[in-house]
Amino acid sequence: MFLITSSTNLKKIFISSDHAGFRLKEYIKKHLKNKKIDLKDLGPVNDKNVDYPDYAHKLAKKIKVSKNNVGILVCGSGTGMNIVANKHKNIRAAQCFSTKSTKLSRLHNDANIITLGSRLISKKNAFKFVKIFLNTKFENGRHLKRVKKI
């Protein structure tokens, strides 16, 4: 079941990948659009060789515009995109590889970007992680003071 509603307070969802993550990006994008979820694809437009930092920087800059914006980055391992995105101020990118890591990234860390490894997780699991990421809210409380220290 997909629960995203206006109560999630997400202004915009952005998605991007490199060439290794292109097919998974397209899969996620198609399934989100089928659920009537609006998102902006920042590229690439095909699976030709590109440099992942270019796309991670592009998406991170969009997320920084509003605290309610969130992003989805996909590369072969999820690691490269994660490293680049986290170089930006106020970005908390989380490389997610399980339902628990995804849920905790939002609950405890208020992650605003999920990074996924197309070579490490199945399409089905990737989409499940995206759903969890988009539907889980930050707990605040004791976690807020820690997030403020980042």
Image (cartoon, helix red, strand yellow):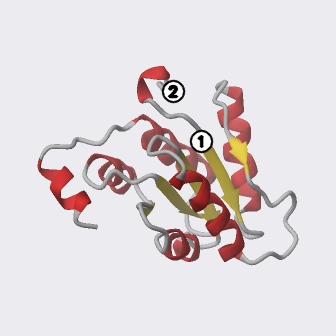
Viewed as shown, does residue 106 lie left or right of 89?
left
Viewed as shown, does residue 31 lie left or right of 64?
right
Residue type marked 2: Phe
Viewed as shown, does residue 36 lie left or right of 131?
right
Viewed as shown, does residue 104 lie left or right of 10?
left
2 or 1: tag closer to the N-terminus:
2
| Between 127 and 68, the one nearer to me in the picture | 68
* Label 2 residue SS: loop
| Between 76 and 143, the one nearer to me in the picture | 143
| Between 121 and 39, the one nearer to me in the picture | 39
* Label 1 residue SS: strand
**Residue 68 visible at all:** yes
**How many residues crowd mark 1 within 10 Å: few (<14), some (14–19), many (20+)?**
many
| Between 84 and 100, the one nearer to me in the picture | 84
The residue to which callout 1 is attached is: 13
Task: Give the quarter of the image for residue 58.
Answer: bottom right
Residue type marked 1: Ile
Marking on residue 64? none
- The residue located at (44%, 61%) in the rendering is 91
Instruction: Classify 80 as above or below 23.
Output: below
User: Could you tell me how many numbered marks the image carries?
Assistant: 2
Cα gap from disc 2 to disc 1, whole angstroms: 15 Å
Q: Residue 101, position in %: x, y?
A: 35, 57
* Closer to viewer: mark 2 or mark 1: 1
- The residue located at (63%, 67%) in the rendering is 56
The residue to which callout 2 is attached is: 2
- The residue located at (44%, 30%) in the rendering is 9
**How many residues crowd mark 2 within 10 Å: few (<14), some (14–19), many (20+)?**
few
Q: Residue 106, position in %: x, y?
A: 34, 48
- The residue located at (49%, 56%) in the rendering is 114
